Amino acid sequence: MTDPQAAEHWQIRKPAVLGRRGMVATQHYMASEAGANVLRKGGNAVDAAVAAGLALGTVEPWMSGIGGGGYMTVYRAAEDRVDVVEFGMRAPLRAQAEDYPLAGGSTGHATFNWPKVINDANVHGALAVAVPGHVKGMALALAEFGSWDWRDLIEPACQLAEAGLPVDWYAAHLMSSMARGLAMYEETRRVYLADGLPPTAGGEGMLNRLPLGNLAATYRTLQAEGPDAYYRGALAEGIAADLEAVGSRIRLDDLHGYTARIAAPLAIRYRDAVVYVPGHLTAGPTLEQALGSLAGHLAADSAVPKADAFAAYADTLLAGYRYRLQHLGEGNTREPGHTSHLCVADGDGNLVSLTQTIMSGFGARIMLPRSGILMNNGMMWFDPRPGGANSVLGGRRPLCNMCPVIAGKGDGGMFAVGACGGRRILASVFQLVSFLIDYDMSVDEAVHQARIDVSGTDLVTIMEHMPAGVVAALLRRYAETRIRANGVSGFAFALPQVVMREANGDMAGGCFVPSPNARVVAA
């Protein structure tokens, strides 16, 4: 039970941003500005997304970066076509189930509720690292759909990396809360806890800057030599050598053999809209299942969702997650097989919804000394029990929670939406899609509408500012419930962004509080 003295009582709003020339919504205002500058100088939505995505890894490295992977959903207005760039992480070729012996118990809600592994080897440390795909994915998106040169788009990230991590109160809070985990690994400890303690925020109006090891030099190498340097050549050899030195299964041939790819999205027809989302290994199939169920049970006869609507949301999510965790994974498809999100719209009508991640806060907590890259803990996505559709297998791509959506409404408007927050992403995106389609909410209304979370257990978590009648109805209906404040340091309900482009060209973008650094910037 929450101590009333420790409860958060504020309510914070970030009004939607309006414009017509384009806009970028990300989890950090510096990355949003980097992307918006590309739009102002004539770049398209994919150009801006690549610039903003690369920049995010330097200003919120605990969430995403070039040591991770992700998915990008792209709408090209001229072709009236949606494509998906898949660059998720992959198990090392030498990965084996025996690396993750079961310890009994569960890893807990934050780490998928898989059976617990001895020493949490799939959660942090060298064996938790999966083969990263971020750089390969950005390069493929740019080559297929972009208009700018790689060297120009990585420049903002290079400059931000050279300046050092901006340490404001929020960054200082995150590093303090994760300090015990950071202290476990030598290079991570040396960089983030240089004097044995977490860095502190600057004084009023000032930002402290924290050098990120050799990350700036790595960005400059990628700028000069091109994105393939991450996977072949001296930089790749250093990455592989550092990983091998700490006990990872990743070797140089893992980097050589990694491929990103362009895929068709799932196209989900929902009422008079079409919702596009990545397929087989993401939360897309579960979103499809949930929307299919919702269509027959939700009566949108009011301006805002009421108790029956939230019960329908909860029921469909409970059923969807039960199926997802039992049946989905690369073993069920013929396809080869802490997060951050951003949305971009440009003046020509193109849209991008991009989710990228290194998984948990600070990923595997392994920073590579030669390159300064903070590595993902993507092996946590696999079920450590052998023999299943999502079990550990060398070269396999795991089931993940990412769900970057682009949707076309019946009135000709289109929107991009997605979120960070692990398992909570699906519930967040699912409800926002419903708010925007079933209730025809504005972006400002949708991002501030109270929501619930249902994300893999029987627990239904309710936002504290939900109307009292709705809260009472949900408490009566579900045996396991809790009420949570939507606080500035919590991820209880995921952190979404939305960008909407109306048929007449008007645009609106919204970032969901609590993330204090998230911002929409108009071009």
Image: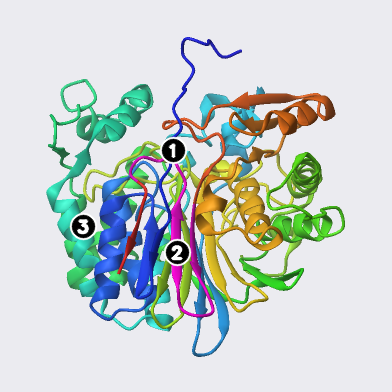
Residue 81 x/y as whole percent? 57, 83
> Which residue is rendered at x = 74% and y = 30% of the image?
469
User: Which of the pair 288/239 is nearer the observer?
Assistant: 288
Name the one closer to the observer, 422 or 41.
41
* Quadrant of res 341: bottom left
Q: Count the labels in the image.
A: 3
The alpha-carbon separation of the residues under discs 2 and 1 comes to 19 Å
Q: Residues within 10 Å of mark 1 (few under 14, many from 20)?
A: many
Q: Mark yes or no: residue 206 visible.
A: yes
Quarter of the image with the N terminus in it: top right
- Residue type, label 2: Ala
The residue positioned 42% from the left and 35% from the top of the image is: 125
Which portion, as a residue range, is magenta?
A: 497-517
Q: Is residue 192 left or right of residue 382?
A: left
Mark number, residue 218: 3
Q: Position of residue 99 (x, y in %)?
A: 56, 37
Under mark 1, the amino acid is Pro
**Comes first in the chain, label 1 or label 3:** 3
Q: Left of 347 or right of it: where is 74?
A: right
- Verify whether residue 501 appears in magenta: yes
Q: CA distance from mark 3 to mark 2?
A: 36 Å
The residue positioned farthest toward the right in the image shown: 296
Name the kind of residue labelled 3 in the image: Thr
Which structural element holds mark 3?
A: helix
The verdict on residue 183 being magenta is no
**Residue that carries the numbered disc 1 in the rendered image:** 514
Q: Which mark is residue 508?
A: 2
